[in-house]
Amino acid sequence: MEELGRIIRLSVQVAPLKRGEKPARWYDADRIRRVDAVTITGDGVIGHLDGHPDPIVDVHNRTHPQSRHRGDNGISLGVHGHYELMRRWFGQHVTDGVAGENLVIDREDRLWLDALRDGVTALGEAPVVFGGARDIEPCVEFSRFVLGGDHEGSVREPLQQLRRGLRGFNLGVTAGAGTVLRVGDRVFAGTPD
């Protein structure tokens, strides 16, 4: 297994980030909550805040009342180096985690889908193994957000720039459901022997 990086941010989306009706929908990053820990389940992610007993169910968890779970998007992974690139292109408002990924790792260079094809393992309280990695395709609303929020013009360029994993990756859990992950836990490409 090759180490990809350590987790530097954990978050959940408490409600859908795209709001309003087409064609006037917008991206609402205020619905992202930073959390201290996440439990990885077969249904998706559940967030936890230290000192607060109530869990926070991510909107991509199958059990969320407004669930956006499609079967292949229960868990998401972002990369700090991808955010550095987005900040160079679009500005400082594109902060780590603003795209809503559940896990953000401290990797500095670009991560490509090919590196995740043989699975991903995170070492938390116990190992959790992810499979089925796929690129998260950018949406019009997020593309407008990176361009400055109220942008009314073409989003063709950011839609192209944010592809091929720059916007993050979706994963499914294949082993270790119920594992809790925290900031500092290590993430690897590949699976244990």
Image: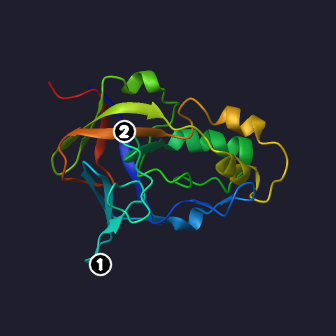
Q: Residue at x 60, y 43 (%)?
A: 84
Q: Is residue 13 visible?
A: yes
Instruction: Name the image quarter holding residue 29.
Output: bottom right
Instruction: Name the image quarter holding residue 121.
Output: top left
Q: Which of the pair 159/116 is nearer the observer?
A: 159
Query: What residue would you read off at disc 2?
Result: 171
Query: What residue would you read off at disc 1?
Result: 52
Kindly state the secondary structure of the residue where label 1 is placed.
loop
The numbered mark, 2 or 1, whose residue comes first in the sequence reads 1
Disc 2 from disc 1: Cα separation: 27 Å
Foreground disc of the pair 2, 1: 2
Residue found at the very far right of the displayed protein: 153
Q: Residue at x 39, y 60 (%)?
A: 58
Residue flagged by tag 2: what amino acid is it? Leu
Rendered position, 56 above or below 68 = below
Quarter containing the N terminus = top left
Rendered position, 37 above or below 42 = below
Rendering coords of residue 23 (x, y %): 75, 54
Q: Is residue 105 visible?
A: no
Rendering coords of residue 5 (x, y %): 37, 39
Rendering coords of residue 39 (x, y %): 26, 57
- Mark 1 crowdedness (10 Å alpha carbons): few <14, some 14-19, many ≥20: few
Kindly state the secondary structure of the residue where label 2 is placed.
strand
Which disc, if any, is residue 72?
none
Q: Which of the pair 187/72 is nearer the observer?
A: 72
Residue flagged by tag 1: what amino acid is it? His
Quarter containing the C terminus = top left
Rendered position, 141 above or below 81 = below
Q: Residue at x 19, y 47 (%)?
A: 177
- Left or right, 38 with reference to 148: left
- Left or right, 133 with reference to 166: left
Q: Residue at x 42, y 43 (%)?
A: 77
